[in-house]
Amino acid sequence: MGTSTVNRLERATGVAALKHPEYTGPNRCWPCTLLNLAIAALLSLAVAAATTLWVPDTGVATLTGSIVAVLSVVVVYFRGYLVPGTPALTRRYFPAWLLDWFGKPPARTHTAVDPRATLVSMGVLVDDLAAEDVVLDAAFAAAWQERITAYWDDEDAVRATVAELAGTTRDRVEFESYPEMLVAFDGPDRIASWESRPACVADAAAATTLPAFDSTWEQRPLAIRAELLGALRLFVETCPACGGTVSLRTEVVESCCSSRDVIAATCVSCDARLFEVDAPPDLLAAG
Ligand SMILES: [Zn+2]
């Protein structure tokens, strides 16, 4: 059974709603899951061994061991872990190389384009001599902001834009919120995810504003359009959710069993996360 079939079954039967979203689905931590399954296996063997001390019958021991094994797997499936506190245990006792091997949260796919140079060539980012950096072109910034305001209260328009980007139809797209993540599904298939709803609205608004500035926008491959939209979010100055100021800074993000340094764009008023990317080590060294 493929992942999408499992997703569809879970969503259709309501099982998805029973899961502990912080530790399952896209947030499941595989080191913790595997550690807990190993603990479950040891526990089942121990229960089976203990059973033979009371009832000298291997059939009964197999039964009790199996019951414990099945219950444990069910608990890990719904809660993400069996033993309370294992996230901390894993963080403490799993060597870093092993955690690395399981992979950090899905890395952004890097395409052949340089997003910053491309956005400059499109004229939506311009040199700011005073800041010695690039900033949003004023006309683009105003058009984008206007579209963000319109999209904020229009979930259907956001859905339609995301559907068009993903090459599907609006009635097939569904959004689901997870802690610190908004995921778009096309039926059972996961098509995109964002740091938050404000990030998704900013992308949808930019995707419909950009064609006026870039005549080849519609011809650009989806992966490149997605990367350009993500890069643009670094330049959002006003929070789509509350109008607060968005600030860019490096932060340490604690996941259940590891911590990593990220560059994040966050609203100082409502804490909405607009952009997050792993910080390159050279940047951290430079402070
Ligand atoms: Zn805000």
Image (cartoon, rainbow, N blue to C red):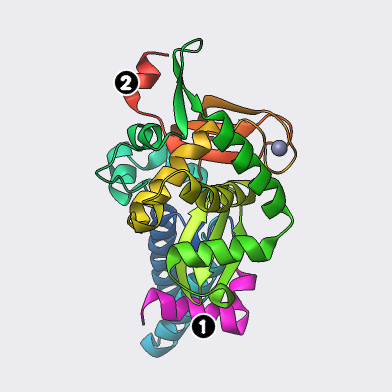
Residue 118 as seen in the image, left or right of residue 195: left
Q: Residue at x 40, y 74 (%)?
A: 3
Q: Position of residue 2 (x, y in %)?
A: 36, 78
Q: Residue at x 58, y 70 (%)?
A: 174
Q: Secondary structure at mark 2?
A: helix
Q: Position of residue 283 (x, y in %)?
A: 37, 20
The tag on residue 276 is none
Kind of residue sitting beneath label 2: Asp
Report which residue position mark 2 lands on: 282
Question: Which segment is the magenta one?
Answer: 1-20
- Whether residue 7 appears in magenta in the rendering, the answer is yes
Distance, label 1 to label 2, CA atoms, is 45 Å
Q: Nearer the viewer, residue 223 or 55?
A: 223
* Above/below status of 143 relative to 192: above
Q: Residue at x 66, y 66 (%)?
A: 156
Residue 20 visible in rendering: no
In which of the image's four quarters is ligand 1 placed? top right
Q: Position of residue 49 (x, y in %)?
A: 40, 73
Q: Secondary structure at mark 1?
A: helix
Which residue in the rendered view is the most extreme toward the left?
A: 112
Q: Specify the principal SS of the magenta part.
A: helix
* Above/below status of 130 relative to 70: above
Residue 116 visible in rendering: yes
